Amino acid sequence: MKKKIAILGSTGSIGKTLINIIKQDIKNFEVVLLSAHENYRELFKQAKFFKVKNLIITNKKSYNKLKKNKFSKNMNIYNDFNNFKKIFKNKIDYTMSSISGIQGLKPTIEIIKYTKKIAIANKEAIICGWDLIEKRLDKHKTDFIPVDSEHFSIWYALQGIEKNLIEKIYLTASGGPFLEKPLKKLKKVNIKQVTNHPNWKMGKKISTDSATMINKVFEVIEAKKIFKISYDKLEIIIHPKSYVHAIIKFKNGLTKIIVHDTNMRIPILNSLYSPKKIINSKKLDFKTLNDLDFRDVNPKKFPLVKVLKMLPNNTSLFETILVSINDKFVELFLRNEIKFTDISQKMNKMLNLYSFKKYKKIKPKNIEEIIEMNTKIKNNIGYLLKK
């Protein structure tokens, strides 16, 4: 019997990687839902190939253009995520949630009810709404696998191991495009330089997050929530070649180091099939293993790592504020309205404001509170900057 699959965010890099994996084993899968925000041409191309009956495209203009396509008449095309009940009559086998940004939170939570397994590649959903996600997973007995290479590596390494044996988990960071660049020269870097990641092909937003290293701060928050591990047991370490994805030191004196090729195919493929799948991968790179080149993070070059000291141990709306402020500053940078170094400088100052710090004690009760806070921050960032 074919496995039934849904892909939220099928036109992004994660979605496309999964699409290519399924293409190589198409006889074993039936894609029942694809979604995108704006790229209706790519979405329609994917839908035609897999004969998908249900499409969601959230951009109104793209939705209208797709509806006009004469070949889409046999498809159910929706403009939002409020139609899962119409689409899913029974639980499907697997869902990939790879919608970027806070807008991925609601569909991620809502689709859990309709799937046996969900792989989540949306940082913001886990950072801002993990408690809500976890409750939904438990309620509907849905399995969860993290897809970020670091979190998948940790998840895989901890199979069958009790959490109280963990002494330390190290998440590796490449250091981005400016690892070797003098600090004083960072003020003049441009968008092209910032988004030119040395190891990964990513979008402009995530590439900028990598250059500031806020992406790794986000990954520490995710790891803390997913694996229920305190911040003092989590640490970022620079590994420029991105070959090692996680290091776990145990209290019994043993250490696990998880290595895989520098691409997302490995974690995505293993989330789809389970980690028992036999695949063709590159030979072990002993040249890289002989020169792993681990380094401590320099907080002067990557000042956003200081954010980790601001984070409360409890779940709070402060995490949503952090994500929202970063999103807005990256957006301003990518519009050439602020300098690259302004992102970290202004964020650190803003997060220390009492008006934000008070939210460390407030736990979000529902999705609406998180979305409302996100909207509030983004709408008022200009005023706050002037203040």
Image: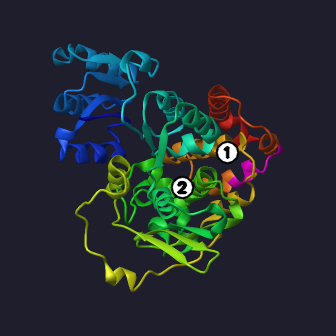
Q: Determine the CA span between mark 2 and mark 1.
A: 13 Å
Asked if residue 181 shows in the view, the reply is: no
- Three-letter amino acid code at disc 2? Asn
- Give residue 49's quadrant in the image: top left
Closer to the camera, 38 or 123?
Answer: 123
At which x and y percent is residue 189? Answer: 48, 61
Residue depicted at x 33% and y 82%:
286
| Image quarter (top left, top right, bottom left or bottom right) of the C terminus | top right
- Three-letter amino acid code at disc 1? Glu
Indicate left or right for 377 with 114 as reference. right
Tag on residue 340?
Answer: none
Indicate left or right for 336 with 217 as reference. left
Q: Secondary structure at mark 1?
A: helix
At which x and y percent is residue 179? Answer: 49, 72
Closer to the camera, 27 or 204?
Answer: 27
Closer to the camera, 94 or 103?
Answer: 94
Residue stretch rendered in magenta on the structure:
348-354
Residue matched to label 1:
319
Residue depicted at x 26% and y 74%:
283
Asked if residue 108 shows in the view, the reply is: yes
For label 2, the crowd category at 10 Å Cα-Cα, with few meaning under 14, some 14 to 19 and many 20 or more, is: some
For label 1, the crowd category at 10 Å Cα-Cα, with few meaning under 14, some 14 to 19 and many 20 or more, is: many
Residue matched to label 2:
215
At which x and y percent is residue 96? Answer: 39, 40
Residue depicted at x 17% and y 39%:
27
Q: Secondary structure at mark 2?
A: helix
Mark found first going from the N terminus, 2 or 1: 2
Q: Is residue 186 magenta?
A: no
